[in-house]
Amino acid sequence: MKEVEILLVEDSPQDLELTLRALRKNHLANAITTVSDGEQALDFLFARGAYAGRDINNHPRVVFLDLKLPKVDGIEVLRQVKMDERTRTIPIVVVTSSAEERDRVESYQLGVNSYVVKPIEFDAFAKTIAELGFYWMAINKSVT
Amino acid sequence: MSVSDSAPKESRGLSLSRKALLIICVPVAFQIVLLFALFGIDRAHDRDREANRRNKDAIASGYRLLGLLVDAETGVRGYALTGNPSFTQPYDRAIVEFPKEIAQLRELVASGADGVDDRGVAELENLAAPVLAFERSSIDAIRNGRRTETIATISEQGGKRLMDRFRAGMDEFISHQLLVNAQREQAASRSRQVIEIALAVGGLINVALAFCLAIFFTRSITRRVQVVIANVQNVERNLALHERVGGTDEIAELDRRLHAMGAALREADEQWRRAEADLRRFFTVSLEMLCIAGFDGHFKLLNPVWERVLGHSLADLYERPFIDFVHPDDREATIAEAQKLAAGNLTIRFENRYRCVDGSYRWLLWNAVALPEEQKIFAAASDITDRKQFESTLQDRAMALETANRELEAFSYSVSHDLRSPLRAIDGYARIFEEDYAGSLDDEGRRLLSVIRGEARRMGILIDDLLAFSQVGRRPLSANAVDLGRMASDIIADKRRRYPDRQINFVARDAPMAHADSNAIRHVVFNLIANAVKYSKPEAAVDIEFGGRADGDHNLYWVADHGIGFDMRYADKIFGVFQRLHTNDRIEGSGVGLAIVQRVVERHGGRVWAESEIGKGSTFFFTLPFAQNQIENAEIANERSGNPAG
């Protein structure tokens, strides 16, 4: 059993609450760590700063990454994670409000594992999050 | 006068060499003729003298003949008287000598040109023969002893008569010879006179002839040569030439050529003057600033534009080195450029600033060329200050536009992210409220929550459409061959799936392949078909027709329906963003679809319009150009007009 199953990087408390609710409803919220900006996300993944004691090799099963983040934005987080030998195998799913092609193209170029646009309608949103959770927790087999 | 006029005129017709020949030959020929004449006269004179000498010889011979006969007669008489035979010796000598003497005389007379002919000598011989015969008979008679008879005969003067007749013949002969001789002397003296006169007159005539020729030719050569010399000087000084010297000789030819040369020089001079005047006119009216500057750093010649542009008087500009007027920041470059010029390079589109009289600076654009052998620079400058300012303004605007575009993009990005999150929150929390507090809500409460959620969704759609519209304007286009008919069929199929309860009839007519960006053009076809479905008559079948054809330099396509149509008065309005002609809530739509259609078509360089009649249906037309480059041109035009394309 992994220490952290899902790392949720989300700056909007509302989106965070809605996401957690959707995961919880589907019993997927057991081992979720949430951070609210890119810097914290990088600290966690590279086991530094507030997360200095963490084992860097203990990867989360998946990272749900918003793109528009304070301090370090999601694209930069993605770049650093995918550029580093130690972290590049961590599956990263961009979950964003942005339907911008530019973001999508750049994310895929950096090696994102999935790119999901958050639907505005809550029902659709909840369904999308639940399916993502199922897929990455139950269906997908990760490296470790 | 007429004689003296005509003579030089004739002599002008002769070439100079002929004239020289005449001057020499005429006197020489005259001299030769004179010499021959004199020679002839002299010969005649000599002949006369020779004849006279023979005359004299003939006379002497006559006297000798007479002497012989007289001696013979006298001897015979002595013989008769004395009987001494020795007295016959003169007769014996006469017998021998007389024929000899006669022969000599005959020869003298025969060779004489005139005078006594043979007849005279023969007569003398005839007259002498009886005398000699008488003497013979006398001698013979004496020898035969008839001495006395002989003396008597002699005394009867028989011998004397014969002798006298001979003497008379001889006298006549001699006197005739003397006469002839005198005549000849006279003739000789006359011919000597003739010779002397001929010598004197001939010499005079010769001198006169030479003099006249000299005068004639002086008139025809020297004076004309002087005219030619004067003409040469006039050509040299560029003055008008004297009139042409007449004639056809070398001098006339020289003069003719000189006139031709003078005319050619005047013509060239005139042409040069005109060209110079023309250039000066250009120099004066030019809008460009024209100048000639010396390698010494001073202007040498400036046209009036300089005063007009810079405000300095030309005198001021001439007075100071031109570098003084150049902006301090541009001096180094200007000096470098001038050095390049002096080294033989052209200056093309060099720019620097010149100070005006009010202290401001004007930007000048230069073309120049140097003439090192004259230490001069020829230059033309345009005042491009306005253009520079315009360029600067343009640059500022371009930068402002770029900033605006960046901001717009940031705005659009921000809208995409930030405007949707709250909507999701509104919908999400309303939904949670609905779920978690379902028990405490009555029907009205649930209805109100449903309105909140519905409006949040509508807002989401508006934002999505607006983003799509903005993206359609910004995404770069890549044109390929696109089958719009097939695209329309696919969209219809999708619509049929989405509205299974509507009957959708679709007819795709033959249409040419479009040259377009397939993603972008899909928006067009999709929105037009969606509109046709949306604005169809309720409860009736939806009839949609797609077609197209080539039309001039573009393809024309259309989507027609039999729907509710619209008022043509608003035909232009329907393509505006958020413009809706129908307020009916039943018809969903944000009012962005046709704006997207218009934007995509126009970005392809095409045009879109609609024809409609209320209750009958609408037809939407759009055009797409054939060729790639037209799309690119349209793109460039769009970028210039400020449409962000990236």
Image: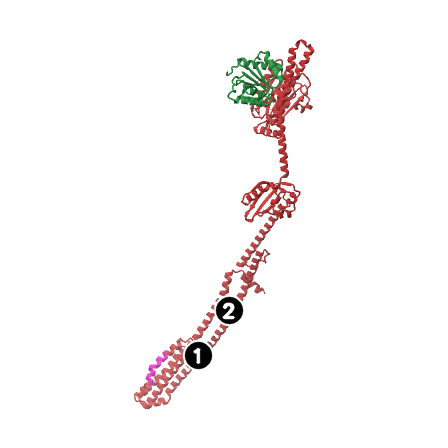
Chain colours: A green, B red
**Which residue in the structure is indicated by mark 2?**
B206
Q: Badge 1: how crowded within 10 Å, few (<14), some, or many (20+)?
A: many
Give the amino acid type for the residue marked by disc 1 in the picture.
Asn
Per the image, label 2 sits on a secondary structure element best described as helix
Residue B211 % position (x, y): 53, 67
Region rendered in magenta: B90-103
- Note whether residue B330 is visible: yes
Q: Nearer the viewer, residue B128 or B113?
A: B113
Q: Nearer the viewer, residue B373 or B161?
A: B373
Per the image, label 1 sits on a secondary structure element best described as helix
Chief secondary structure of the magenta span?
helix
* Mark 1–mark 2 distance (CA, rounded to whole Å): 37 Å
| Badge 2: chain ID | B
**Which residue in the structure is indicated by mark 1?**
B181
At horizontal 59% and vertical 42% (from top left) the residue drawn is: B331
Residue B377 covered by magenta stretch: no
Q: Badge 2: how crowded within 10 Å, few (<14), some, or many (20+)?
A: some
| Badge 1: chain ID | B
